[in-house]
Amino acid sequence: MSFDVIRDSLGDNRSNLYPLTSYLVCGTSMSSSFHNSLLVVKLRNILPLEARMGELRLGLEEEEELEEEEDSSQRPRPEITSVKIDHRSCVNRIRVANLQGRQIAATWSEQGQVHLWNLQHHLAAVDDGPKADYNTKPLFSFSGHGKEGYALSWSSLVPGRLASGGCDSRIFVWSITEEGWKVYDTPLSGHRSSVEDIQWSPNEQNVIASCSSDHTVKVWDVRNLSKPSALDIVAHDADVNSISWNKNQTHHLLSGGDDGVVKIWDFRYIKVGSPLLVTYLTC
């Protein structure tokens, strides 16, 4: 299963304003392709873990006595509400972005397609209850990879800009135009094996990083899609499965591989003929 957190309009910096509310979108991976779905989920009355652990430490009998003494209105119970969207194959990866007031989810399908979905009706349903049965179909679908994949990333700087990387070793860049969704014909090519993860830079709108089962991490400038990667690092001794930019120190990138190592790369130390400064964390 893959999931992503939906950014809501309830405000930032509310970690201490219990009970909390959160929205998620999840994708299933069932053995039967026709039984898979997306789930738009609302979590209400989320309490701090310390409160529940404290109750458990009291013991069952003492907790029951405590519940009898306390007004139930003072201790709201967590609630989960969900709405299902049919998805015709396993969901390898799901990522969501807010685009012009709409929550748009991108999904990587086991059948080799990338789909876009509008979640607005379903978010309204988990808030107010379903008003109708929604026979939801994708806003847009792309089959150009030819194989399944796992890598998806929305740009936080350019609304509607998406990148998808697949087992075909290629990365396609997407954008939204007045006519609708567009996938550029020229992919970013250079990896020799499956693209496992991609991440847009949090401060450079034309920069994207990727990692692959070919053991490398690459950094690309998407202003010219036909050019090779701007930076090519043999990063691990095995498949590189995950990367992540540091949003506060944007010259730092993390990578994690099948070799059981997490590496922190510092791009400030890039010099011609000199290696990157890298810190190793062994798992």
Image (cartoon, rainbow, N blue to C red):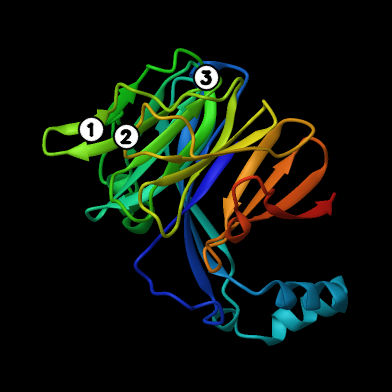
Q: Is residue 59 left or right of residue 28?
A: right
Residue, x 38% and y 71% (percent of image)?
10
Q: Nearer the viewer, residue 240 or 237?
A: 237
Residue, x 67% and y 49% (percent of image)?
274
What residue does disc 1 label? 181
Which of labels 2 and 1 is toward the front? 2
| Amino acid type assigned to the residue bearing label 2 in the image | Trp
Q: Nearer the viewer, residue 237 or 67?
A: 237
Q: Secondary structure at mark 3?
A: loop
Q: Nearer the viewer, residue 97 or 251?
A: 251
| Amino acid type assigned to the residue bearing label 1 in the image | Trp
Q: Is residue 266 left or right of residue 27?
A: right
Q: Residue 117's x, y, as percent?
A: 33, 36
Residue, x 86% and y 79% (percent of image)?
58
Spatial CA distance of label 2 from label 1 is 7 Å
Residue 112 numbered mark, or none: none
Residue, x 46% and y 36% (percent of image)?
38
Disc with the residue nearer the chain's start (2 vs 1) = 2
> Quarter of the image holding residue 46?
bottom right
> Quarter of the image holding residue 222?
top left
Q: Residue 207's x, y, as percent?
A: 42, 47
Spatial CA distance of label 3 from label 2 is 17 Å
What residue does disc 2 label? 174
Q: Residue 130's x, y, as percent?
A: 32, 47
Q: Residue 44's x, y, as percent?
A: 50, 65
Residue at the far front: name it.
273
269 to 56, vertically: above or below: above
| Amino acid type assigned to the residue bearing label 3 in the image | Glu
What residue does disc 3 label? 148
On the question of residue 137 being in view, the answer is: no
